Every structure is written in structure tokens, then in C-alpha cells.
Amino acid sequence: MTGILDQPPVLSGEELAAVRADFPLLVRTLRDGRPLVYLDSGATSQKPDVVLDAEQDFYVQRNAAVHRGAHQLAEEATEAFEQAREQVARFVGVDAGELVWTSNATAGINVVAYAIGNATSGRGGEAARRFALAPGDEIVVTEAEHHANLVPWQELAARTGAVLRWIGVGDDGRLLTDQLASVVTDRTRVLAFTHASNVTGAVTDVAPFVARAREVGALTVLDACQSVPHLPVDLHALGVDFAVFSGHKMLGPTGVGALYGRRELLEAMPPVTTGGSMVEVVTMETTTYAPPPQRFEAGTQMVAQAIGMGAAASYLGELGMPAVAAHETVLAQALLDAVASVPHVRVIGPLDTADRLATVSFAVDGVHAHDVGQVLDDAGVAVRVGHHCAQPLHRRFGVAATARASASVYTTVEEIEVFREALAGVRAFFGLNDERASA
Amino acid sequence: MTSSMEQLYQQVILDHAKSPHGRGLVAVDAAPGHALGESHQVNPTCGDEVTLRVDITAGGAPGAAPVVAGVSWEGQGCSISQASVSVLTDLVTGADLAEVDRVSETFRQLMHARGAGLDPDLEDTLGDATAFTGVAKYPARIKCALLGWAALRDAVVKSGVAIPASTVKEQS
């Protein structure tokens, strides 16, 4: 648990080999026996044994309904479930009571959006009035958002009469932070933005967003899906009001994510999904609700997945996120170098590794992203192709689709070399002559 | 390069993708005897899209099925999706709606044959479209190949022209 932080913050070759040995899937081969080069961690990460074991162990040893029942198994299950909440909360620098389990990050954003909508309808009483929107109030997002942090706000605006505005993206793929002064106004009630783009890989400087939101009294909602798996993230230190992230992108299972909300906000927020487990007193006429986080956890929870997510947080915590981030900066440079070495490839995103993830989206002149992905797949290289759930951002750069190579803690520079070699052959495969084209 | 890849990207497909047939929407006036239909289809997973227009005229003989007099389209997408619309244009231009229905259905069958192909007699009716046999080995790409065909089916529906049931029976 200790030690690694005392060393220079980068994974040694031995440490990386040990990390890779923790991920059973990485040794499998593909068609024709090709080794797998998994560069699609931005979509979902692979899972280490400790995560798989944690889920299995829950079912084998402790499976019971949590937060109900007085028998020993129920107690052990509840303890494991709440310990996982503790692990995940600690990993992102918040208190366990501020961390709500959600089925994924999208669900987390929808909890906030629908709670605001419910408050606007008068639900939640006096305490929730601070969330209520009036026609003409403004919700501000950015052009770089994943659809998950855009569509719920479009819907909330449509339901409440609020106006949706957005911060633009510069040619380098970074948010145009200067626009905060003009786009965020006294009417802005919500400022929802990504911590790191799943397309450009650009990491947002959160401070000016939070500062501007506080000036005008707007709530901040941070999409931390791409940052939490790859960077040290301290949500209290960042000062955001809400944040979401998912388990499956941070080496954990699918079916689980987390919503962080500042305690006083969660306490004032009306519930969204209602039913069992989130109540205090129910009569035939009316119901009082449990305090957070249970108020937002109606119905049977994804207990095994939450425990798996807790194990993933602990695993990353033991590696040390400064070391993970340092390793991934090396990978980001390798990816950028690989793409730059191949003619007629254009990167959508920053060309340097400052405040940048090892997530590189690119377009190959004359070859559609799907076809690029197919050629890479033939070399065993798994990348994402398409718009990566960020159509407006692709439109901003005048492309319908890109290919995206995204690394994680278990990715090696050698794998990126396999990617580079395969990418170098793409245009030739489709009969495009680079000598002539570049002359 | 694996053999699967070579089967996927047959030269016919690469050629059609490079120089697609029927590309560029043609404005057709709704003259008497012409029914026009247009459809816009997108593949939401990758953003590929196609807008396809059909110009349908009455068949030659009395009681004969109406005929696709012209197909034009505009689109963006991968080589599979673009080549597929191009091949479709060749196959259905001049065909009556009963034939269009048959060839569309045959192409759909081909896409669900997991790369094994179809009965040779049936494949003969597909012309260049048999080059897409290998696509069916890649489930993620089947939608690419079917995008234009989905647009064709919808455009015919939107033209409002019905296929006389008698012609379907007669020719099938």
C-alpha cells in the first residue's frame, strides 16, 4: 500500500508487467492468433483480478439483501456495500455520505437534472426551492460534452423553460475558458462541464469554471468519467457541487457509477426515482424520504458491482494515481508521436501532453473512421470509431467520425508501436498513394 | 492482411466506394405518371448517413408493377456503406418494384448468412452485391451495408406507390 509514492511517480517496466499480469483478459489472442492491443479504454477499461474476485467473493461468501434483515449475512453484505462506498468516496476525496450509487454516470447526471426539474415543480418543499428554475434561467454546458452531459440538460431546459447555452471549443480542442465571462451570466443556474474530454483528451482547468459559477450563484456539475480513472482527482479540492463517474471506465464493473453531491445540496434535493429503500415513513397518502445518499438509491442496488467498484478504487489507489498519471503521460506522448509519424492523419485535440489524457482521436484523409478501425482491428488493435457520443464536438471540427486510441494504466509503449505500424498501412490498403498525395 | 479482411474489402467494393454510382441528388419534377420518394437514414452508432431519392413510373404493360426509373443519393460514411448504395443504384434502376422487393430481401439474407453466402441461383440475382458476402462476418459492419437499402425501402414507401399484389405473386 505504501512505498510507491516515495519513488519517482512513474511505473517501472517491472511494475507495468506486474500490473498487466493482474488483467486476465490482456493475454487472450484474436483472429489468427494475433495478440490483443487494447486501445479502447476510453470506452471501457479491462478489469483486474481483484475486481473480479471482489464480485465473486460477495456472491460466494456474503450475498444477502443490504440495509434490511437482521441476520449475519445481511450485516456482512451491508458492511461490504458501505465499505465500497467508503473506498470510492475516499478515492475521489469526498465523504461516504456524499456519494450516491447510480447505475452509470449518465444516470448520475439525470438524477441531478430530474431533481432540479422536480424542485421546479415544487417537490422537495422549502429546502428544494434553491434548485427551482424559472423560464429564462440559463443552463450552461460546453461544446465538448459527451451526450450524457448534454441531452439531460436539453431535456431539463425543455421541461422548465430554461435556456441552454454553451462554452465553445478552440481549434486545439481545449475549452474556450475566456467565454465563461460572457456565456455564464447572472441568469445561469447550472454550469455542467467535462473534466476531461472523451474525444480530445483535453483536461479542463476546473478552477475558473468553479470561480465563475460561484460569482453568479450557479451549481457546478462535473463529468469526471474520463478523469477519475487516469488522474488524481480530489472533488472537495476542486470545489464542484456535483460530479459523476462510472465504475467500468476505472477498472470496475459495468452497471455501477457514482454521483457526488455536496452534502448540504444532497440534503436539500428532492428524490428522483422513488420506491423502496429510499423512504422513512410511508402511509397510504404520503411518504417522507430517507436522508442522502439512500434518498437517491431506490430499489435493490447493484451490490456486487458497487463492491467491485470499491475494489477498483482501492487497486488504483494502491498503484498511486500520480504514478498512473505519469505513466499515461508517457503513453500520451507515444500516441501523439505515432499519429504524427503517419502522413495525412489529423488529430482532433491538443498536440502536446500538458493537461492531456492518453486519448487521441484522429481522422485519416480519404479513409472513413470505420474503415480505419477495421484495418487496425485486423492487426489486433482495438480502437473506437464513430462520434464517441459527442456529435456536436465532431461537427465543430467538420468531421462525422473519428478513430480514437485510448490507453490506460496497463497499456505499454510497445503496444502503441503496433498501433503505429498498422495505422501506417491504412491509406495504402485503400489504394491512396501518399507520395503523390503529399507532393 | 487476413483472408477475412480481403473478403470484406473486395476490389468491387473498393471501386464502388472510390467512384460511386448515382451519387448526387437529382431533382425530379413530380410530372404526371411519376411518383417520388425520399428517405434520410442515419446509423446512430457511427453517424453515417444517406439521403436517397427514387423516381417511380408506371410499368410498361397494363397491370405490370411500377418501375424504378431513377435513383439518386447523397451520403457520407465508410467504404462499405457508400459502396453498398452505389451497387444498389445499379441493381434497382430500371427494375420493377416486385424485383426491387426480391433483390432487397435477398441482400438482407446475404447479410445474415455469416459470410457463408447464399444459393448460387439466388446470388446471381445480386450482381456486384455478392461482393458484400464477407461483410456478414463482421456484425458491426452489417448495418453499414444495409443503410442504403433501408433508405430505399423507406423511399419507396414514401412514394406512395403500392406494389400490385398480383405482380408479386406472379413473379415470385
Image: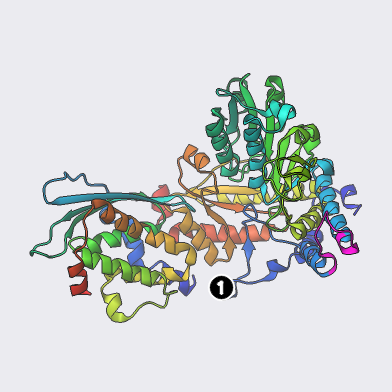
Identify the image quadrant of the N terminus of chain A. bottom right
Give the prevailing secondary structure in the magenta stretch: loop
**Does the magenta portion include A70?**
yes
Q: Nearer the viewer, residue A19 or B38?
A: B38
**Magenta segment, which residues?**
A61-74
- What residue appears at the point 69 percent right and 70 percent down from the top-left corner? A27
A168 relative to A307 in the view: left or right = left
Residue A384 occupies which quadrant of the picture?
A: bottom right
Count how many numbered circles sit on residues in the image: 1
Residue A112 occupies which quadrant of the picture?
A: top right
Q: Is residue A99 above or below residue A16?
A: above
Residue A139: give x, y in percent of width and height. 59, 29
Q: Which residue is mark 1?
A: A31
Residue A240 visible within the image: no
- What residue appears at the point 58 percent right and 34 percent down from the top-left corner? A142
- Read off the chain for label 1: A
B2 relative to A64 in the view: left or right = left
A317 relative to A423 in the view: left or right = right
Residue A43 occupies which quadrant of the picture?
A: bottom right
Residue A53: give x, y in percent of width and height. 80, 66
Residue A52: give x, y in percent of width and height. 76, 65
The coloring applied to the image is rainbow
A111 relative to A82 in the view: left or right = left
Categorize mark 1 by other alpha carbons within 10 Å: few (<14), some (14-19), many (20+).
few
Residue A115 visible within the image: yes
- Label 1: element kind: helix
Residue A54: give x, y in percent of width and height. 81, 63
Q: Is residue A325 above or below residue A354?
A: below
Q: In this view, which residue lies farthest toward the front?
A: A284
Q: Is residue A249 above or below residue B87?
A: above
Q: Nearer the viewer, residue A285 or A201?
A: A285
- At label 1, the amino acid type is Arg
